[in-house]
Image (cartoon, rainbow, N blue to C red):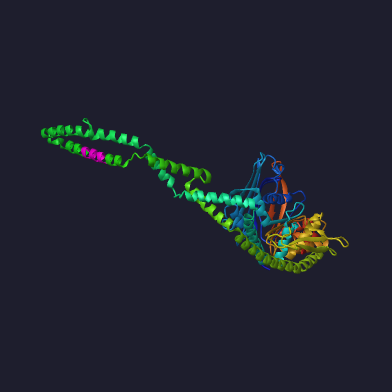
Amino acid sequence: MALRHLAMLTTLRIKNLALVADLTLQLQPGFNAITGETGAGKSIIIGALDLLLGERADRTLIRGGADGCTVEAVFDLPRGHKVIDRILDENGMEPCTENQLLLKRVFTIAGANRQFINGSPATLAILTRLGQELVDMHGPHEHQSLLHPAKQLDILDSFARLGALREQFAGLMTQRTELENRKAALIVDERTYAQQLDLLSFQTHEIEDARLQPDEDVQLEAEFQRSGNSAKILDLCQNALNLLGEADDSLLVQSGELGRLIQSLQRIDPAAADFATCQEQAVNAWNELQSSLRRYADSVELDPKRLQELEERLNLIHGLKRKYGNTLNDVIAFGEEARRKLTDLQQRDVELGRIQAEIEKLKKELGRVGKELTLARQKAIPRLARGAVKQLEDLGFRQSHFDISIRSAETLESPLVTATGLDEIEFLFAPNPGEPTRPLRAIASSGEMSRVMLALKTVLAAEDEIPLLVFDEIDANVGGETASVVGEKMLQIARQHQLICITHLPAVAACATSHYVVAKHTEEGRTVSEIKLLGTKDRLHEIARMLGGQGDAILQHAKALLK
């Protein structure tokens, strides 16, 4: 079967976290096994992923002598990922470049805690939301989506291929909510209804009676300014006209004397002809200015009645702006909205009847689609349960019992009803015969939990959209033949997902398509953890070490496992 990856973790870089000084892990598609001696630092990989999934930053994990810790991850989305793209877009994050999603987490001893998505600062909540779509971790510190009933319902519906039906139900629920909100806005008691009617009527008529025009206030202010200062304007104009030509010592009178002097100068020296031209131009300019001032003065009227009209109009506009908006356009818009609301209220009985008829029609359709969803789920539950039981038997639970409970709403008003339908489900498990089944989230043993997760993931591999699965201590309390089965199951899942498994079992590690080993050594008096991808020869020796030695018999056993 060809590998199918909606997304893949290609690079994980860890800097100054616990025993790691600076480590870059280049991961491969398929099944990645990570092994190493106890205490070598394998758990640091899990800790780094936890940080990228939004877990709380523990500053005691910062490497001694360092000011802070950095964890970075690169996810490859070769065909894009609609959910990831939507989350980025809804939160104003930078889109992925070259189909790569870049996550970064930084925290310091001083208390600074920062997150970045595609280079942009982000909140921890957004990082957590992305993590829920990208990584499923199973182990002592699991980030397990399968423990939540809502996610269990998603998986059941994906297994039964009910996506289109669910979308149809969700769309109908959205329409119903919108209609109920419109209905609630119209349903008020009679006293409140009368008050709203009076208020909206007053507001509408007050604004309409003013007969406002857009930006009218700007023009009125300018005219009021001129009209209020008309006497002063006329006085200034008259003084200017006197200075120009209407007084005995005016500029134009004196310019005539100036012209005669220049003519006399020109008769003596023809080179002074330019002065006469300049004097003539100045006289023409003063004459033009005199004519313009007269026309301007004639346009100014001393009209106390008009001034009063302007003042009253502006007072009216300012009063409306204080009540209904900062600008005249805001007041006009408020009036239009008030008119619409008034019309709705005046016709509320007709509108209520129409809305209620639409709601009743939607309820019937919701009931039909919801029941169709319920029946499809009830039909799919036995098939999913049988598949899980078969996988659990292979994993050592010979007489375990797995089931799925379903509880359905009897009416659309039930709290069980959500955008996902009328049902609530719960995965139930009993590891031993004679025990009652309990919710999956109530299972205490991490070894049992991990194997149940592995069984479910095997059944659901083709449907589950979370691309990266991480199993930590999946081999707890597992040995012998079951260990080989665990490895085979992981390899089967890895045909549909990228998988990382930290393991102590050679039979599990031998099934991996890529094998990494974590080791620690002393460097300049300090302990440092490192990780490397093993080649064929080194991998043989690592499997032999896990088996307990390096003798010929053990090496032959290791070769057999790797085959």
Q: Residue furthest top?
A: 249
**14 over 449 or under it: above or below:** above
Residue 538 lies in quadrant: bottom right
Q: 262 left or right of 28? A: left
Residue toward you, 406 or 316: 316
| Residue 96 at x, y percent in the picture | 58, 56
Residue 67 in sight in this render: yes
**278 over 485 or under it: above or below:** above
| Residue 113 at x, y percent in the picture | 65, 44
Report the residue at 75% width, 51% height from top: 141
Residue toward you, 270 or 299: 299
Question: What stretch of residues is rendered in magenta?
Answer: 282-291
Name the chief secondary structure element in magenta. helix
| Residue 397 at x, y percent in the picture | 83, 63
**37 over 420 or under it: above or below:** above
Report the residue at 17% width, 32% height from top: 257
Residue toward you, 170 or 528: 170
Residue 78 lies in quadrant: bottom right
Q: Is residue 285 magenta?
A: yes
Q: Residue furthest right?
A: 434
Q: Quadrant of the C terminus?
A: bottom right
| Residue 199 at x, y percent in the picture | 57, 49
Q: Quadrant of the N terminus?
A: bottom right
Q: Is residue 487 magenta?
A: no
**371 over 311 or under it: above or below:** below
Report the residue at 48% width, 50% height from top: 209
- How many discs appear? 0
Q: 418 left or right of 399? A: left
Residue 481 in sight in this render: no
Q: Residue furthest left?
A: 267
